[in-house]
Amino acid sequence: MALLSKKDANLILDPLADNNPITIQVLGICSALAITAELKASVVMALSVLFVLGVGNVVISLLRNVIPSKIRIIVQLVVVATLVIIVDQVLKAFAYELSKTLSVFVGLIITNCIIMGRFEAFALGNGPWKSFLDGIGNALGYGVILVIVGFFRELLGSGTLFGIPVLGDPVTKTGLYSIGYENNGFMIIPPAALIVVGIIIWVQRSRNRTLIEEA
Amino acid sequence: MNTEKNSYTVIFAAIMVVVVGSILAFLATGLKPRIDENERFEKQQNILYAMGVNQNEGDGSVTFIPTNEVEAEFSKYIKKQLVVQGDKVTEKEEAYLIDLKKQLSEIKAGNNAELPLLIGEKDGKEFYIIPMYGKGLWDAIWGFISLDENMVVQGVYFDHKSETPGLGANIKQRFFMDDFVGESILDGNSYAGIGVVKGNNDPLNQDKEDNEVDALAGATITGNGVTAMIKESLKLYKPYLETIRKK
């Protein structure tokens, strides 16, 4: 990447794998459980977080020298909440259908620990450009896991991807269903997300043993 | 600049509130017309859906008339918009935009309420479309039910604010809504409505005279909410329905 120095590139690439917010830092699990029953919701949630975290990190970083440390958490909350309301209102005005499926989740962004975590841990101590990259990187890292989990949960739970049947029709028994395959209803409910995330963590740590904490 | 001083903190907070407040106020006013229009189109889509004007394909899809056509279709199919106040029935333009929730709380408070009712016409047949509003497990549920003059359900549409995905949220799925079609809301002469019941020995919903449809597994309270919502709404419209009912 000629566009970014190696250090800057790492700000984006690290959270995608070895410092992933969900599987390594174990942040943002709550929303990962709630919305990953469908791939579409996962993608939209990932994009919303990308926007909020990218912009939010920059705003906090620009203000980092003027924010009084006594009320910095409140200031961070105000910034997140404002951005989330903007996202919500814009979706309602320009993508109403989407906003309906998303209304429950958009509110969840405010409480997403990744966002507050990055504000507090990174944006308060770094310049706007670096903070922007960090925000984008972490949001992508979050989004990747969301999409992976959403993919498996929708495929195994409903036999569809983005709402399109890919395994055949369970009612008329075509495709895979004709040889006795059944949708796994367990994948629809939130605990299934924990199991999928668990498997991702397991695979990731067995491939890169330096990630395993000392007992 | 000393950012640790209390006065600085107070001033910072005050400025922040003003700035954020004006950004949001500006945005909300700017987008409000568009949002209102979206909500109006959605209501039209839902009403048309309940009278069977939709673009459903196959067995699974719930597809409305597209947003850019819905206004024209709405004025084509909806012949009359009425307001029911007890025995008094008056015609009113845009009656469908009346906020039912508000009217229901007026009724609770013992005041006069304006209840909207729409008459649609499709293929020479009349549909009486009643809006409904009730409570699910977590939050509000609402919908529309369309009847013919024999008090047989021609179609329904349900929606919800935040029922559990995969469980109660399924009230807006085809397999649930389609079950209501053809059911009679009358039990003898009483407006019994339609119950969402477990174990009615009729999972394929072939018995259209039993005032019952099969419940959703794992969504008992949402189902009960639907039952209550239909019953309550019919109670309110009973005086009017009595006048149009074929006996």
Image (cartoon, coloured by chain):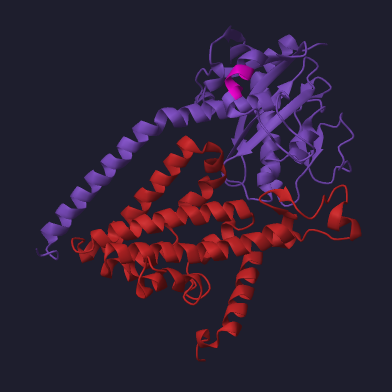
Chain colours: A red, B purple
Front in this rendered view, residue B79 or A170: A170
Question: Residue lying furthest left in this view?
Answer: B1
Image quadrant where one finds the C terminus of chain B: top right
Q: Position of residue A206 (x, y in %)?
A: 60, 84
Residue A175 sits inside the magenta stretch: no
Left/right placement of residue A12 relative to residue B81 reads left
Q: Position of residue A102 (x, y in %)?
A: 54, 47
Q: Position of residue A45 (x, y in %)?
A: 52, 54
A191 lies above or below A49: below
Chain part drawn in magenta: B69-74
Residue at (35, 49) in percent of width and height: A82
Image quadrant where one finds the N terminus of chain B: bottom left
B64 lies above or below B126: below
Residue at (48, 63) in percent of width and height: A140
Tell me if I can see residue A116 in this picture: no
Front in this rendered view, residue A127 or A49: A127
A166 lies above or below B4: above
Magenta: main secondary structure: helix
Residue B71 sits inside the magenta stretch: yes
A139 lies above or below A204: above
